[in-house]
């Protein structure tokens, strides 16, 4: 018959190991209002992905579009950078690369004249970073943090691949093509923003 104390010790060790992997919340140190403002900005980014509005803002308010497309994600990423530091795999370097690429994207959107020269390299770099980084988070952690990794990978895949497929499969002015493009790209931004918010916000955040 096994020793109850030994069983209890083994169970405690297993629970301790599991707690390292299962992360439902990280303490970013950011105020609740800032995180919520970032979430609202991400929702605005999803709305701005609607083609007529997107094209109008690109032509008439590129600075506003750059802020909307960047502010929310940057706040969320800085929060995760700070909040994951105590974890066993903080992935700090990867977060800094993601933040730097988003800042580069902000500059490219705000200054349309340089978008032609650096827009594609930035988009490719984002895909090359987001996809393996998201997979790494999903592999290393459980709980809500794993969902962040899964949706990070899905976000970059859908945002990058769906426009290409739509261009190849549908005529330029096809409403079916427009719907096939806008529904998944808008939906994935909303879902990704929500899972980022869930891991950063708890009821006792002030």
Image (cartoon, rainbow, N blue to C red):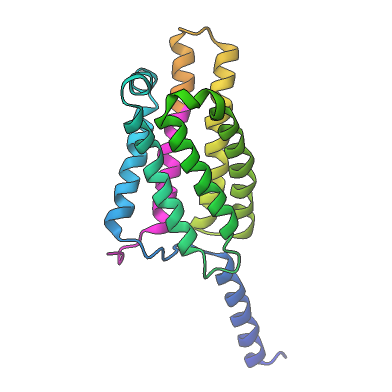
In the rendered image, which quarter contains the N terminus?
Answer: bottom right
**What segment carries the magenta color?**
184-206
**Left or right of 80 in this view: 201:** left
Tell whether position 76 is magenta: no
Occupied quadrant, residue 91: bottom right
Task: Report whether residue 151 is seen.
Answer: no
Work out whether 43 lies above or below 141.
Answer: above
For the point 42% across and 29% down, which residue is it? 111
Q: Is residue 123 left or right of residue 63?
A: right
Asked whether residue 193 is drawn in magenta, I would say yes
Residue 82 position (above or below residue 160):
below
205 or 60: which is nearer to us?
Answer: 60
162 and 123: which is toward the camera: 123
**Residue 47: x %, y % from top left:** 34, 30
Rendered image quadrant of residue 200: bottom left
Q: Considering only vertical position in the picture, is 83 above or below 73?
A: below
Q: What secondary structure do most residues of the magenta stretch adopt? A: helix
Determine the residue positioned at 44% across, 49% down.
195
**Residue 80 can be seen, yes or no:** yes
Picture residue at 59% right of the left edge, 70% below the top: 18
Image quarter hosting the C terminus: bottom left
Dividing the picture into quarters, in which one does residue 52 lie?
A: top left
Query: Residue at horizontal 58%, vertical 43%?
Result: 130
């Amino acid at each position: 018959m096994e020793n109850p104390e030994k069983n209890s010790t083994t169970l405690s060790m297993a629970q301790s190991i599991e707690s390292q992997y299962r992360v439902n919340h990280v303490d970013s140190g950011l105020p609740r209002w800032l995180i919520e403002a970032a979430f609202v900005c991400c929702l605005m980014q999803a709305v701005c992905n609607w083609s007529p509005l997107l094209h109008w803002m690109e032509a008439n308010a590129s600075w506003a579009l750059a802020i909307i497309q960047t502010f929310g994600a940057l706040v969320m990423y800085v929060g995760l950078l700070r909040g994951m530091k105590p974890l066993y795999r903080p992935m700090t370097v990867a977060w800094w690369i993601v933040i730097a690429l988003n800042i580069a994207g902000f500059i490219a959107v705000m200054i349309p004249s340089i978008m032609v020269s650096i827009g594609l390299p930035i988009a490719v770099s984002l895909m090359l970073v987001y996809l393996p980084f998201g997979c790494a988070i999903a592999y290393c952690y459980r709980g809500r943090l794993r969902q962040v990794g899964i949706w990070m990978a899905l976000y970059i895949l859908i945002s990058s691949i769906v426009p290409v497929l739509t261009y190849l499969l549908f005529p330029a002015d096809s409403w079916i093509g427009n719907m096939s493009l806008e529904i998944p790209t808008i939906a994935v931004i909303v879902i990704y923003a929500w899972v980022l918010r869930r891991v950063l916000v708890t009821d006792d955040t002030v």
